[in-house]
Amino acid sequence: MPDDSPPQAIEALFAENRTFPPPPEFAAKAVCNDPEIYARASKDSDEFWAGEARRLEWFAPWASVLNWDSGEKRARWFDGGTINASFNCLDRHVRDGHGSQVAYFWEGEPGDERRITYADLLAETCRLANALRELGVKRGDRVAIYMGMVPELPVALLACSRIGAIHSVVFGGFSADSLRDRIIDGACVAVITQDLGWRRGGKIALKQIVDDALAGAPSVSNVIVLKRVGDPIPWMDGRDVWYHDIVPRQPAQCDPEHMAAEDPLYILYSSGTTAKPKGIMHTTGGYLTGVSSTHKNVFDLREESDVFWCTADIGWVTGHSYVVYGPLANRATSLLFEGTPDYPDKDRFWALIEKYKVTILYTAPTAIRTFMKWGPSYVEKHDLSSLRLLGSVGEPINPEAWIWYRRYIGGDRCPVVDTWWQTETGMIMISPLPGLTDTKPGSASRPFPGVFADVVDAEGKSVPLGGGGYVVITRPWPAMLRTLWGDHDRYIKTYWSRFAKQGYYFPADGCKRDADGFYWLLGRVDDVMNVSGHRISTTEVESAFVDHPNVAEAAVVSKKDEITGEAVAAFVTLKGGGIGSPAEADELRKHVASKIGAFARPKYITFTPDLPKTRSGKIMRRLLRDVMENRPLGDTTTLADANVVKTIAEMARTAPPEE
Ligand code: WTA
């Protein structure tokens, strides 16, 4: 059972009532500065979204804007319309005379550079699309993509969408086991990967991990391998194909498939409250409408002059929507960066902004808090005067970090847009419009025009302004997920059963709404942790623990963390009941990282002889959270053995976290 009681109100957050109106010179020129937009969109949302969809190019027009089957929760946006995502991202811009505009400035971790124009990107996409067709990949087939942030990664997404193949990108930090699960679930027919990837001067053996994953994933016939690093790699003749052998010899033209608006564009897996990840499925026309509209309006994009930098990896939804599809559909010039903020030194981001004259930066609170910890001296070495807008995404941003971001990165001149959304929503849902909306540090402000949200109590009743509860979405939106791949029942159960009577979509986030109607998102209310903006399921980490031969039982909770927002905290009982040594704790950390990925490595491990359980055997995670947060222990009367939790509290105090 998910523990979905509303989170504690964070009163300190509300003591924060500074308000920053849009700077007048910014507002005067803003892409969206018509205050009527909110009223217009809520009066006739179909007409609003139809208007946004008309910014795209359709092969055939739609017959209806939205068909909503409220029983089966199936949304059909722009039914009857046909469209191709890669055509909208590439061909039409080149045709209209913008072929020489840079689509991506790319910088590799070692400092190598490439600039890829829209004409280059179109030609390369066509070649890879033709290569996929040569290998027998057809419309509707699933293709897994497992790469670092190289230019061929967006090319891979676009090539799939060009031929109507459904891409399933797996973040390059996932383990072989996680990759295998995802490939099997999607029955992928091909994988696109690279030999190795750069990581802080070291190398990640991506192709080797693919090989490990494919032992046990028989659906895959071919692996296309890009040479990025150049070290020798394992090879399977007949299955593996070098990118440089098959792609360059292809023609640079490839007819785009005419896809129905509701044909799937991609699957992207996200952690749920069970050990099995959810294959979130997005379709084509509505998704592209939602991401291009939000990208244009939230980021105030001026395609002829801006350099947009979303620092997210394409392996996560933020990269799908705001590195690839949104910016390209809007003919943006973006920066694409392979490395990390601290390599070779802690000023890498600022050096990049100065060098490429980045105007819009979109990054995550964990990164901002890390920069705060490093101190402003790294920032001050560089000229950041090109910046004019800052964005935040992935987790709640605390007011201190928001203010620091605005002051040190934005020079007190750039508006800050805190954008709340999810893999499931596909597009930004709650965010200021920087030319129109006041901003408050720590608040994502208000729903985007045409998005209908509310804050409700446990019964689904709207909570008056000033109160808190759960955020819900009360009407379908164009970029919404359509189903979970192969499991429509789970889709209904996960998102639509909590407020079935009202018919609301349930994101599983707590939220307060202040007297001005501003939304303050407070974090997850289910068993999903948010570590550095990455969603990690407590159950998935628990399964990884018990997969280790020495572990009898494990319970995992999140603990608040100054930098990463939340950290993974585990309580582990060993077989035989002994108390593990620090070396054993380390071995378990490694084990979890190898099962899921390094980003899921537990920071805290407490060995305990027993776990706090109810008489019916249910682990009381709430008590474990109290233990980790050093809070007074709540009601322990339902415990089978009330002493257990005292012992655990004692042991947790002495277990050192991993630095
Ligand atoms: C959290 C990332 C507060 C939230 C786009 C959500 C946020 C989960 C914010 C989705 C924000 C994301 N303020 N919380 N601005 N943005 N979240 O699927 O808990 O990786 O449910 O999508 O991140 O994470 P996901």
Image: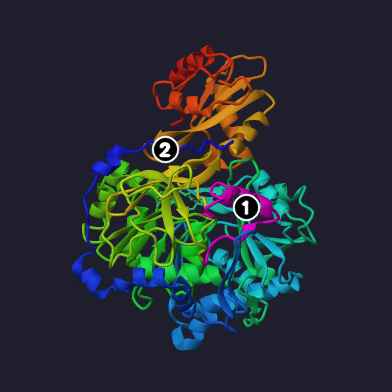
Badge 2 amino acid: Pro
Q: Can residue 116 be seen in this view?
A: no
Task: Specify the label residue 7 is tagged with.
Answer: 2
Q: Which secondary structure lies at badge 2? A: loop
Residue closer to the observer: 89 or 53: 53
Q: In which quarter of the image is residue 588?
A: top right
* Left or right: 550, with 135 as reference point: left
Above or below residue 292? Residue 412 is above
C-beta proximity under 8 Å, tags 1 and 2? no
Q: Quadrant of residue 454?
A: bottom left
The residue most toward the left is 24
Q: Which secondary structure lies at badge 1? A: helix
Q: Is residue 624 visible?
A: yes
Residue 125 located within the stretch drawn in magenta: no
> Which one is earlier in the sequence, the residue at label 1 or at label 2?
2
Above or below residue 300? Residue 63 is below
Query: Dot 2: few (<14), some (14–19), or many (≥20) neighbours within 10 Å?
Result: some
Residue 493 located within the stretch drawn in magenta: yes
* Left or right: 218, with 212 as reference point: right
Q: Give the range drawn in magenta.
A: 478-505
The x and y percentages for residue 370 are 36, 44
**C-alpha separation, residue under disc 1 versus residue under disc 2:** 24 Å
Q: In which quarter of the image is the N terminus?
A: top right
Badge 1 amino acid: Ile
The x and y percentages for residue 64 are 57, 77
* Left or right: 407, with 622 as reference point: left
The x and y percentages for residue 607 are 55, 20
